[in-house]
Amino acid sequence: MSYQIRLMGDPVLRQTAASIEDIDGRIAKMVEDMVPAMYQAEGIGLAAPQVGIQKRLFVYDIGEGPETLVNPEIVDSDGEWSFHEGCLSVPGLSFEIIRPKEVHLVGRDLDGNEVSIEADELLARLFQHELDHLDGVLLLDHLERDDRKAALRQWRDIQSSRHQDFTTRADIALP
């Protein structure tokens, strides 16, 4: 199956994902299909809700091969780090976001084994970003009110431009 990444405005992105009770073949197949979608979009992380699946898992790859975390949660965090952050569900936009610099995350791997990871900087940011998706939180939710309004205007302009480009291409293709 080929997954389409859901874009901001899709209600599925605002829902809280359900815990996974059994890590079975269906979950493994879902992950197997999510990884190529992440790579195709040139992302380093992809949460299940971003492909329309309300389950608490995400895949990621920061250059060491794809990994999966099931039912992840952050149990501790420390420090503060401001960094530019983008999102596959809000393509074309990125923002300076302040997040904890270090996190301790626990969850399970695809074999059901408990996983405990101490992460900092990029990996910590990735974990926090993907966990946000599992909780129905989008990147823009981290912005101040005026910045969020400006970002929404930018998003509408980008979407309008994409629609216009599609319409123009469709018009050209017509006999």
Image: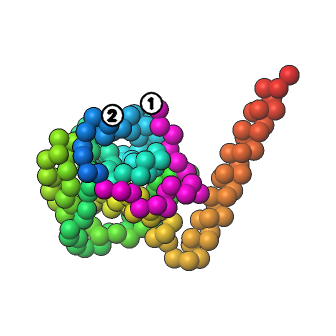
**Would you say 74 lies left or right of 90 here?**
left
- Which numbered disc flags the more N-terminal residue, 2 or 1? 1
**What's the residue type where badge 1 is placed?**
Met
Q: CA distance from mark 2 to mark 1?
A: 9 Å
For residue 128, what is the image quadrant?
Answer: bottom left
Within the magenta stretch, is there residue 6?
A: yes
Q: Is residue 66 visible?
A: no
Q: Residues within 10 Å of mark 2 (few under 14, many from 20)?
A: few
Q: Residue at x 36, y 56 (%)?
A: 18
Q: Secondary structure at mark 1?
A: loop
Left or right, 156 with reference to 116: right
Residue drawn 55% across the image and 51% down it: 7
Q: Is residue 13 left or right of residue 44?
A: right
In which quadrant is the C terminus drawn? Answer: top right
Span colored in magenta: 1-19
Q: Position of residue 8 (x, y in %)?
A: 56, 56
Label 2–label 1 contact, CB within 8 A: yes
Q: Which residue is mark 2?
A: 29
What SS does tag 2 mark?
Answer: helix
* Residue 39, horizontal then vertical, whole percent: 40, 37
- Outermost residue, front side: 21
- In the rendered structure, find residue 128 and report the number of the disc placed on it: none
**Residue 1 disc label:** 1
Would you say the magenta stretch is mainly helix, strand or loop?
loop
- Single out the residue that lies furthest toward the bottom: 145
Q: Position of residue 146 (x, y in %)?
A: 59, 76
Where on the picture, by quarter, is residue 110? top left
Q: Quadrant of the N terminus?
A: top left
Q: Residues within 10 Å of mark 1 (few under 14, many from 20)?
A: few
